């Protein structure tokens, strides 16, 4: 199985960890969506790396749990 298909990716931004434990394609989708919302400093990294850079979850922008901090630290 490719690492890109494993739920080991996270998105971080200037606000903190946006999401974690998602596939790479899900992370890219969220990073693009955040860009459209004007969120800067977006980066796709492994969940492990995200936890090293910051532990502060980002403030949720929507009620959709797939794109909010509710996914933060899930199964970690």
Image: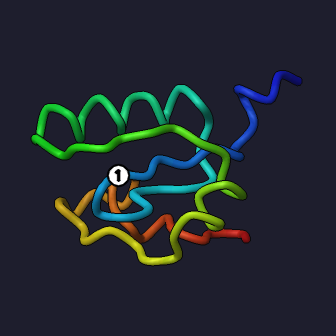
Work out whether residue 41 or residue 1 is closer to the camera in this orientation and state it: 41
- Above-or-below relation of 3 to 56: above
Which residue sits furthest top? Answer: 2
Residue occupying the point 17% across, 61% down: 61
Which residue sits furthest right? Answer: 1
* Left or right placement of residue 62 versus residue 67 in this view: left
Residue occupying the point 24% across, 34% down: 33
**Quarter of the image where the N terminus is located:** top right
Work out whether residue 65 or residue 14 is closer to the camera in this orientation and state it: 14
Report the number of numbered marks. 1
Residue occupying the point 69% across, 44% down: 7
In the rendering, at what x and y percent does residue 52 appear?
65, 66
* Left or right placement of residue 70 versus residue 32 in this view: right
Work out whether residue 25 or residue 37 is closer to the camera in this orientation and state it: 37
* Left or right placement of residue 56 versus residue 13 in this view: right
- How is this picture coloured? rainbow
**Quarter of the image where the C terminus is located:** bottom right
Tag 1 residue: 13
In the rendering, at what x and y percent does residue 64 appear?
28, 57
Q: Quadrant of residue 62?
A: bottom left
Q: Quadrant of residue 69?
A: bottom left
* Left or right placement of residue 28 versus residue 65 in this view: right
In the rendering, at what x and y percent does residue 34 appear?
23, 41
Tag 1's secondary structure?
strand
The crowd level at tag 1 (other Cα within 10 Å; few <14, some 14-19, many 20+) is: some
Residue occupying the point 60% across, 71% down: 73
- Above-or-below relation of 17 to 2: below
């Amino acid at each position: 199985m490719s690492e890109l298909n494993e739920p080991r990716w996270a998105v971080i931004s200037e606000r903190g960890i946006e999401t974690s434990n998602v596939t790479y394609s899900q992370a890219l989708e969220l990073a693009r969506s955040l860009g459209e919302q004007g969120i800067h400093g977006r980066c796709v990294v492994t969940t492990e790396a995200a936890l090293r850079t910051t532990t502060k979850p980002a403030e949720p922008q929507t009620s959709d749990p797939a794109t909010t901090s509710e996914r933060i630290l899930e199964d970690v």
